[in-house]
Image: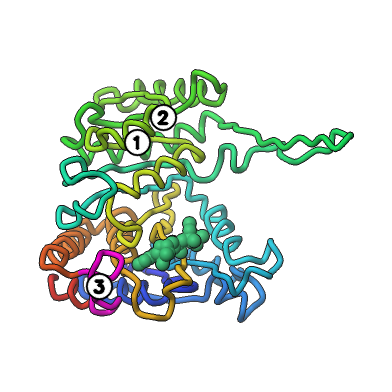
Amino acid sequence: MTQTFLLLPGDGIGPEVTEQARRVLDVVAPDLKFSEALFGGASYDEHGLPLTDEVLNQARQSDAILMGAVGGPKWAGVARHLRPEMGLLKLRKELDVYANLRPAFCFPALADASSLKREFVEGLDIMIVRELTSGVYFGEPRGIDDLGNGERKGYDNACYTSSEVRRVARVAFEIAKGRKGKGGLYPGVTSTDKSNVMESGVLWREEVIKLHQEEFANEPLDHILADAMAMQLVKKPKDVNVILADNLFGDILSDEASQLTGSIGMLPSAALGEPGTPGLYEPVHGSAPDIAGKGLANPCAAILSAEMALRWSLDRADAADRIWNAVGKALEDGARTADLGGSMSTSQMGDAIIAAL
Ligand code: ATP
Ligand code: MG
């Protein structure tokens, strides 16, 4: 059956980098049926909305979606609920993509660009599985109350239900099954929480333990406090394989881990929902208004996001492996955009990866 792939290039460098991802996909998966739609600021300019119902329906009917980037200073004055970023939040919510996969890897050719010494990051390969649609970012009640006499109270509510924890933990265990042999001290899933001081953390840990016993008893599982994981990541990151984290801790730990890897221009991400529903793929970086339109952006994060789409939504691991190897080969041969200390343009970097294919 034909698989459909929706491109949402978006704003800033989004269109530049997704174009290169599209070129690479054309080589490794020429039978994919592509469509493209406006999203973010580009959609706001045309329709007055960052995400139209038509595009949302198109996304629901696709097998995978690759987003470039949204937002930029051009839309800073737009009403808050119409900002490009709100389109992305709505798309995530509507697709119910609750598991955010944020790999942190370091290609050997880039090991000297890390914030840590080469020996600590060469061959680094961590997968962070972050819960994306619940937790303290969404919990109710939340607000800012006036207590009188100029005193105010701001509050959020960190809460998880057992099914919310179980479904994202299941994704982490499934992923760990395919990543045996990575990590050292923490060879399987390492679940992070603050169960020493938070009730939602106690529930998180209990549910992960229950699910593990019921469905994944033969897989290694560790639990460490989120603050201890933050230390581990800068102390000996190669000891870690799969990190499972809630929305807040996953946000922080994945940004921390990204700095071990050389450049933000290298890192892809995936957001997955229930099996059989479309996954949403996007580079970790934003719209980079400072370099947009100049042909300077590194397209690797977008190309590797397409690689993740082939692997996780389209069941084409062979094609994904080809992309992964071609990126590694191009880097070994010295291909570099400016963020990696080189002088190649966005399309030249795309050329180098296609040549390596
Ligand atoms: P957002 O709020 O959309 O996440 P941001 O301000 O956090 O945006 P980015 O847009 O990711 O950040 O840009 C941060 C810095 O990284 C900028 O200097 C940008 O030029 C650089 N950058 C981001 N992506 C790339 C890329 N693909 N190639 C090269 N440089 C990049
Ligand atoms: Mg950002």
Mark 3 residue crowding within 10 angstroms, few (<14) / some (14–19) / many (20+):
many
- Residue 243 image label: 1
Residue 138, compared with residue 10, is above or below; it is above
> How many tags in the picture?
3
- N-terminal label among 2 and 3: 3
Q: Give me the residue at 63% from left, 68% from top.
A: 76
- In the depicted view, which residue is nearer to us: 1 or 236? 236
Q: Position of residue 338 (x, y in %)?
A: 29, 70
Work out how far the residue at label 2 is from the one at label 3, CA to CA, in angstroms.
36 Å
Q: Position of residue 131 (x, y in %)?
A: 47, 41
Give the labeled residue for mark 3: 24
Mark 3, secondary structure of its residue: helix
- In the depicted view, which residue is nearer to us: 90 or 5? 90
Q: Give me the residue at 31% from left, 71% from top.
A: 21
Give the labeled residue for mark 2: 192
Q: Amino acid at mark 1?
A: Ile
Q: Amino acid at mark 2?
A: Thr
Mark 2 residue crowding within 10 angstroms, few (<14) / some (14–19) / many (20+):
many
- In the depicted view, which residue is nearer to us: 166 or 123? 123
Colour option used: rainbow
Q: Amino acid at mark 3?
A: Val
- Quadrant including the N terminus: bottom left
- N-terminal label among 2 and 1: 2
Label 2–label 1 contact, CB within 8 A = yes
Residue 328, compared with residue 295, is above or below; it is above
As drawn, is 243 to the left or to the right of 85?
A: left
